[in-house]
Image: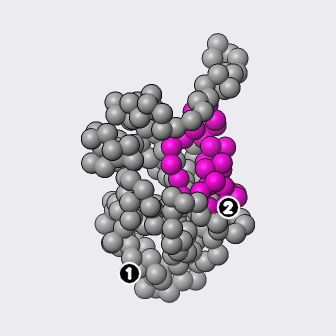
Amino acid sequence: MKGFNDHSTENDKPVDLSMLRHHGRGERVYSEGRGVLVRVCHDVMINKGDGILLVTRDFEPAKGYLWPIGGGINRGIPTEESLRQLTKRECGLGLKEVEFLYASRLMWQTSPFRNGKGTDDLGLMFFARGEGDIKLDKLHKEPRIITPHEWVDLRKKLHPYVRKGMYQSMRRIVPVDASAELCNILIEEGKELELI
C-alpha cells in the first residue's frame, strides 16, 4: 500500500498476529474501552466510475452525514487487509491501488454506545479504485458517486474530514484536460484547506 506501513516485528522476528485478534464488538469491555481510549479508524475514498463513492451514515457518530466507507481497524489484522475486509462487508466492493492520504483526529459528542462519553477517533484516510457492484450493509444508505462537477457545489457542505479527502481524491481523478474552471476550483480548494 502506497504511503503507509504496518510494522509487525519484535526482536527481529515476525509477531504472531493471531494473538492480537479480538472477536466481537458491542460487549461491555469494548464499550468501556471506547469510553477511555482513542479508537483508530480507516476510511477510504473509493473511485468508482467517474467519481468518488460517498454514502449516508445511518448510525452514530456522523449519522446522516455523507461519508466514505470505513470504520474501526480490526485488531491484529494488517491495515490494508482490514480496510479491504471492511469495505467488502459495508459496500460489497473490492479495492485496488490503495493509497494512504492523511490522518485526522475526529471528536464527536455522540456515540454508537450511548455511553455519554462521545466518540474520539483517529481517522486514517485512504484512496483506492473500487471493483464490483455496490451492495450496502444496513449501517449505510443512499450511495452516491460524486463526480468532479457535483463536488464543486457540494464540497463546502461536507464535514472537514470528508472535504479534505474529497479534495485529495479529486486531484487524483480529474483529467489533465479538465476545464480551466475546474482546475481553478481545485487550486482554490487546496489553498482554502491549506494543502497547497
Q: Residue at x 41, y 79 (%)?
A: 152
80 to the left or right of 111: right
Q: SS at mark 2?
A: loop
Q: Position of residue 59 (x, y in %)?
A: 42, 56
Q: Residue at x 62, y 43 (%)?
A: 82
Q: Give the foreground label among 1 and 2.
A: 2
The answer to which of marks 1 and 2 sits earlier in the sequence is: 2
Q: Tag 1: residue type?
A: Asp
Work out whether residue 112 or residue 97 is closer to the camera in this orientation and state it: 112
Membership of 97 in magenta stretch: yes
**What crowding class fits label 1: few (fewer than 14 Cα within 10 Å), some (14-19), or many (20 or more)?**
few
To which residue does mark 1 refer?
Answer: 153
Q: Tag 2: residue type?
A: Leu
To which residue does mark 2 refer?
Answer: 93
**What crowding class fits label 2: few (fewer than 14 Cα within 10 Å), some (14-19), or many (20 or more)?**
many
12 to the left or right of 137: right
